[in-house]
Amino acid sequence: MRLLGIETSCDDTSAAVVEDGSVRSNVVSSQTALHRPFRGVVPELASRAHLTNLVPVVTRALADAGPGRVDAVAYTRGPGLMGPLLVGKVAAQTLARLMGVPAVGVNHLEGHVLAAELEHRVRWPAVALVVSGGHTDLVLAKAPGRYRVLGRTRDDAAGEAYDKVARLFGLGYPGGPEIDRLAESGDPRAAAFPRPTMPGTWDFSFSGLKTAVLYHLRDHPGALKGRGRADLCASFQEAVAETLVEKTLAAARASRAKDVLIGGGVAANSRLRALMTQRGEAAGFGVRLPARALCTDNAAMIAHAAWRRLSAGPAPRAGRADPSLPLRSWARA
Ligand code: KG4
Ligand code: ZN
């Protein structure tokens, strides 16, 4: 089964062709430069950019994939920004109608959870950590289609914390990749930042860590001079990575998961990837990390999630675009 996927939930316009779990093409047009001056995604600008980018992106994805009939068009129903979601949905439904195939709405989080399957054989049950600019979710996936959200962030998403702290460090937007790059040459033990544990829950909280960075800068004038900035990047990054890894592995142990998965923009972080692999494998889990291009927002994961659903039963009714769409199970136990 060959699916065309369309992803427009935030600031990446993406289209992909995926066939029975294999990526044939995956084209992403990033709007980062457009939003950079505002240090965040401006929904109206994002919607307009999706409108202009979508046709060339879809055309390229179809051309890159080579000839072959498309059996369904998948799109992101939510969660995400309303305007951008609507652009993708209308495009997907129009294309599906023209091709005479079903349009399948997909939950964006399910896309991130299942993305690892595009490159690895995943053993279920698995615990997935989805960390991006908008999400910090810990999901127990008993199988494709059977999900329980164990925990989420109480305040800032992990990527949001990265972006805000990057600003305190005088870095550009988005801050995650810049902190990651600078941290490489820094000392992670230079500053002792807290590892917020939120005991008794599977939730996260990053606002305290952000405040700790703010106080550190206030109490140590000149902390960003010379090697100082790299040291602080490394120390902050270590605190975030340890917090995410320890909680994810504790959840994996508690739910007797076989594999641990990660997804979302922050899953591209080199320290998080290294630490999750090291501690996860030492604890006996299979750690299945998607390539960075499949961690950040992309349409291949959306097409893949739709394929999982279509291979299990008839196409679901095309649902409304929903900015806060909850992750629900669609498969029976
Ligand atoms: O998934 P994504 O591309 O978009 C959504 O938010 O949905 O994630 C973007 C977020 C930004 O906050 C960015 O700073 C963060 O992911 N990010 C990173 C890295 N690359 C992107 N954070 C830490 N390290 C990275 N290498
Ligand atoms: Zn995402």
Image: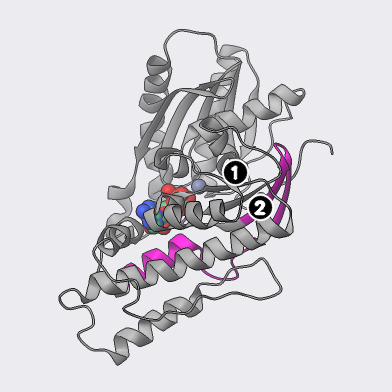
Residue for point 46% across, 63% down: 241
Q: Nearer the viewer, residue 201 or 31?
A: 201
- The answer to whether marks 1 and 2 mark residues whose Cβ atoms lie closer than 8 Å is yes
Q: Earlier in the sequence, mark 1 or mark 2?
A: 1
Q: Can you tell which mark lies on residue 139? A: 2
Farthest left residue in view = 226
Residue for point 40% across, 42% down: 292
Indicate left or right for 33 with 63 as reference.
Answer: left
The disc labelled 1 sits on which kind of residue? Val
Instruction: State the image coordinates of residue 70 (x, y, percent, origin top left).
Output: 55, 14
Farthest right residue in view = 333
Tell me the CA gap for discs 1 and 2: 8 Å
The reply to whether residue 43 is in sight is no
Please rate how many residues cluster around mark 2, counting C-alpha atoms within 10 Å: few if below 14, some from 14 to 19, many from 20. many
Indicate left or right for 331 with 248 as reference.
Answer: right
Query: Is residue 92 shown above or below 240?
Result: above
Where on the picture, by quarter, is residue 53? top left
The verdict on residue 147 being magenta is: yes
Q: Can you tell which mark lies on residue 113? A: 1
